[in-house]
Amino acid sequence: MATMDSLIGLMNRIQRACTVLGDFGGSSDLPTLWESLPSIAVVGGQSSGKSSVLESVVGRDFLPRGSGIVTRRPLVLQLQQTQEHEADYAEFLHLPKRKFTDFNLVRKEIQDETDRITGKSKQISPVPIQLSIYSPNVVNLTLIDLPGLTKVAVEGQPDSIVEDIEDMVRSYIEKPNCIILAISPANQDIATSDAIKIAREVDPTGERTFGVLTKLDLMDQGTNALDVLEGRAYRLLHPWVGIVNRSQAEINRNVDMILAREKEREYFQYSPDYSHLANRMGSEYLAKLLSQHLESVIKAQIPSITSTISKSIEELDKELDSLGRPVAVDAGAKLYTILELCRLVYRIFKEHLDGGRPGGDRIYGVFDKNFPAALSKLPFDKHLSIQNVKRVVAQADGYQPHLIAPEQGYRRLIESALAYFRGPAEKTVDAIHFILKDLLRMSIGECQELKRFPRLQSELAAACYEALERFKEDSRKTTLRLVDMEAAYLTVEFFRKLPQDSEIRPSGNGKKGGNAPPESQEVDRYGEGHYRTIASNVTAYISMVSDTLKDTIPKAVVHCQVREANRSLFTNFYNRIASRATNDLGEMLDEDPSLMGRRQELAKRLELYQKARDEINSVYTR
């Protein structure tokens, strides 16, 4: 079975690694390992002795002191036990390459780092400071020193400072794996303890709360704190621990912490009030008690921690697969990668076009709805009005009026009417071009593997858009040629089948032919009825041509644009890369720096989780 020190030391290393990778205090789409790790948060009112308790546990003077709010940022303090006779030193996370052996400089760095975020003011910040202390005189622990609870805002602090500090403290201690070290001064009524009050809110049963009573030596003569220490005034599941801190005079004289611990032991050993409790009083006992409890918590949490780590490893593997693994360096592998990505995009594009993904149905909608609707809106009624027909026919006849049928008038009316078909034909070509470009854009965007390489993505898109422009121009020429073909040669058979005018007969004036019946009267070739007949005949012909173009123009568009896009959209790009040098191929595979950073971050996190899993398994099964 694992030893206490090995388990706690392992948790400390994992917590530190989590902090390095940015897990601490943040949110992530992956399970946050930090949330599963137990920690000890030190809570108390201002001037309750929190700093003195921490320094007593560490055995070193290193925390800033003063009146009012001194701790203005959370301090994550990791104690790492080293081999006997090794020198004490400290390291800050924000200064990873610097070892502090002078703990006065540690205090100054805490102050400077606090001011870096909050400025030289009385503001607070939730951004933690990470400090590790290595010493043979400490037990393996992780303690979080939080700003002291206060009741009123003083000058230089916002009115919300009371609530801000409570919210910050609560955000730490409400975590189910957080052990609460509630510091209360013995020379104040326990009923007014800020630490006990907020601890009871998040831990009403007291399962996670350890009570610490400070300043026992400052109580009025004739009084003691036995009711609290023996659990009669306020009962906790864990025993209360009394602490005797150094006096301010001793602090000013820089009394050695080892000597202070000896004086503390003597105080409890010879105290008439507390001697019977001496074996479970003092800072040394508190450190051992917390370490033992932390061990039991860690053992209980090992299954859930292991489960969290395994789930994180699985999620990280999936995300790394989606981001893609690093590209090989040789030219053949680079070319293969490029072609493989093109095939992926092409497959997505075909699924959009042929079915399986949305988009291809929009092409059919252009042919089935948009194009016929555009044809139906052409202004043939105005073009073939009696006035316009009469004008066109008269202009076609010139100085000699037509004898039987105004053939030139018919031709001009038909040719000018057929010109109207050019507009819908071109709009259809443009509409299909827009859809194909949109489908290509969607296909490139949906290829997750291609997102790694923004330059390749850009060059592929440019080459494909160029190909689509060429297909569009071919389609435009073909469709307009179909319209022009209809105007170039009229269907004679259509006009041969039209009913002809009646034979001309003399009018009933007693001359040749005598009185003719009404139905054989001479036809007025310049009357309104005559021009209405011409308009009707031209309308019938235009309608026939419209029906033809409804079928042929979509066929031309599909042949020139859709089929070519489906068949040879990437040919232009393939021709471009065929002659590219190896260096150029490598440049095309330059990744987005943000994705490279993300992959490196995930790889580090994956390495942490895998190492943590292996270490937990090896330590826990010893």
Image (tube, rainbow, N blue to C red):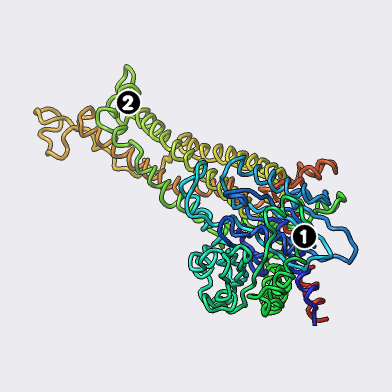
Looking at the image, residue 426 sits to the left or right of residue 90; the answer is: left
Query: Picture coordinates of residue 582 (x, y %)?
Result: 85, 44
Q: Residue at x 41, y 43 (%)?
A: 545
- Establish if 319 lies above or below 152: below
- On residue 520, which mark appears? none
Nearest to viewer (mark 1 / mark 2) = 1
Q: Quadrant of residue 81?
A: bottom right
Q: Residues within 10 Å of mark 2 (few under 14, many from 20)?
A: some
Amino acid tagged 2: Val
* Real-space Cα separation, disc 1 to disc 2, in angstroms: 115 Å
Q: Residues within 10 Å of mark 1 (few under 14, many from 20)?
A: many
Q: Quadrant of residue 133?
A: bottom right
Give the secondary structure at mark 2.
Answer: helix
Give the secondary structure at mark 1.
Answer: helix
The residue to which callout 1 is attached is: 257
Q: Are marks 1 and 2 in contact (CB under 8 Å)?
A: no
Q: Name, please, the residue furthest toward the front.
A: 222
Query: Which mark sits nearer the N-terminus, 1 or 2?
Result: 1
Quadrant occupied by the N terminus: bottom right
- Establish if 212 lies above or below 557: below
Q: In the image shown, does 188 or 241 lie closer to the viewer?
A: 188
- Establish if 481 lies above or below 137: above
The residue to which callout 2 is attached is: 392
Amino acid tagged 1: Met
Query: Picture coordinates of residue 64 (x, y %)?
Result: 68, 50
Quadrant occupied by the C terminus: bottom right
Query: Picture coordinates of residue 407 (x, y %)?
Result: 36, 30
Q: Name, please, the residue furthest toward the right.
A: 85
Q: In the image shown, does 58 or 563 lie closer to the viewer?
A: 58
